[in-house]
């Protein structure tokens, strides 16, 4: 279950660890076995994403967000954690929603070495797995009673659990669809922006990529301003209300650019649009 979850399946593995912890209350060696299997499964499941991040960079994050229930903005939040704590972020990755899924490919994108990644991520996996097993061990009595209750109700209990899982999945999908509908609204295409620049009607262009991303790829759209997320208010105060503003990023579905655009609109700057496809779309337009 840990391996399948780490490979990308939207399933919870912590309840399985708690069940294993409850079983370990009567068999101490079982706890050590379960801990080893969980650490190994998480490492094996994360390595393909880590290597994909090293080879394909931010493009692999688009695939990651398509198969995940987590909002696409988790990429930006994960970048912030990596920028602040470096490899230490991998120690707590499993405890932070979004970071557990996006952390391995992002570590590969940031060019972490394989040994360094396995050391920090493996230590974090050990802490996470041990905490799940410990919870199951402490509450093994309650877990045993829950299993007895499910056994008593038989098929009805299973149907109830499946129904709750389906409701949860449906809710997350609904939230995601609403988020994506916001992303698709009022965006500007890269070709249209290129034509505006050629006509001398260049808008104010804001580069909403993370600081680390700009260090990895120093290219920018001509005339763009790097957006400082540590001082958004100061950056927004310098923007004239009557000018057209285009915001671009390099995250899946332009999520960061859309959020910046929404913040600007709330501050009275109405002529602001995210760049569809972000920086990759702009580079593709330039090449063609």
Image (tube, rainbow, N blue to C red):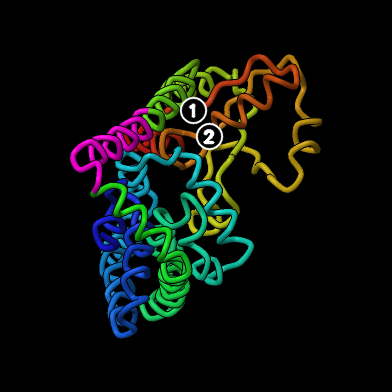
Q: In this view, does 128 lie above or below 209?
A: below
User: Is-magenta flag for residue 166?
Assistant: yes
Which class describes the residues within 10 Å of circle 1: few (<14), some (14-19), or many (20+)? many
Which class describes the residues within 10 Å of circle 2: few (<14), some (14-19), or many (20+)? many
Give the residues in magenta: 152-170
Q: Which of 269 and 137 is in front in this view?
A: 137
Q: Name the residue located 44 percent from the left edge and 39 percent from the top edge.
A: 72
Residue 144, how many percent across, how many down?
A: 35, 60
Q: Name the residue located 56 percent from the left edge and 57 percent from the top edge.
A: 212
Q: In this view, does 15 lie above or below 90?
A: above
Which residue is at the far bottom?
29
* Left or right of residue 152: residue 139: right
Q: In which quarter of the image is residue 232?
A: top right
**Helix or strand or loop: what does disc 1 sit on?**
loop
Q: Mark 2 and mark 1: span between their CA atoms? A: 5 Å
Q: Name the residue located 50 percent from the left edge and 48 percent from the top edge.
A: 219
Instruction: Name the N-terminal-most of marks 2 and 1.
Output: 2
User: Is-magenta flag for residue 196?
Assistant: no
Residue 173, how many percent across, how many down?
A: 37, 29
**Helix or strand or loop: what does disc 2 sit on?**
strand
* Left or right of residue 280: residue 5: left
Q: Name the residue under label 1.
A: 275
Q: Name the residue located 40 percent from the left edge and 70 percent from the top edge.
A: 133
* Left or right of residue 225: residue 62: left
Residue 200, how many percent across, how many down?
A: 59, 20
Residue 74, how many percent across, how many down?
A: 49, 45
Name the chief secondary structure element in magenta. helix
Q: Nearer the viewer, residue 280 or 92?
A: 92
Which residue is at the far front?
152
Labels 2 & 1 near each other (Cβ < 8 A): yes
Q: Residue 248 carries which label?
A: 2
């Amino acid at each position: 279950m840990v391996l399948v979850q780490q490979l990308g399946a939207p399933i919870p593995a912590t309840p399985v660890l708690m069940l294993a912890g409850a079983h370990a209350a009567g068999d101490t060696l079982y706890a050590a076995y379960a801990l080893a299997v969980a650490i190994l499964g998480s490492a094996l499941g994360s390595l393909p994403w880590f290597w994909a991040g090293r080879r394909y960079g931010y493009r692999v994050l688009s695939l990651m967000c398509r198969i995940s229930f987590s909002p696409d903005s988790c990429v930006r939040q994960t970048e912030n954690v990596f920028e602040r704590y470096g490899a230490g972020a991998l120690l707590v990755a499993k405890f932070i929603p979004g970071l557990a899924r996006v952390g391995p490919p992002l570590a590969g994108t940031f060019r972490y070495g394989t040994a360094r990644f396995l050391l920090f991520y493996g230590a974090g996996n050990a802490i996470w797995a041990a905490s799940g097993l410990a919870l199951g061990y402490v509450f093994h009595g309650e877990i045993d009673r829950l299993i007895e209750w499910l056994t008593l109700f038989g098929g009805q209990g299973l149907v109830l659990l499946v129904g709750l899982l389906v409701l949860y999945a449906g809710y997350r999908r609904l939230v995601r669809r609403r988020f994506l509908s916001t992303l698709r609204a009022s965006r500007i295409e890269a070709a249209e922006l290129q034509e505006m620049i050629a006509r001398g009607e260049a808008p104010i262009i804001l580069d909403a990529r993370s600081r680390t991303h700009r260090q990895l790829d120093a290219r920018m759209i001509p005339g763009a301003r790097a957006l400082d997320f540590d001082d958004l208010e100061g950056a927004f105060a310098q923007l004239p209300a009557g000018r057209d503003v285009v915001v671009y990023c390099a995250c899946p579905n332009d999520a960061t650019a859309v959020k910046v655009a929404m913040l600007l609109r709330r501050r009275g700057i109405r002529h602001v649009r995210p760049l569809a496809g972000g920086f990759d779309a702009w580079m593709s337009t330039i090449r063609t």
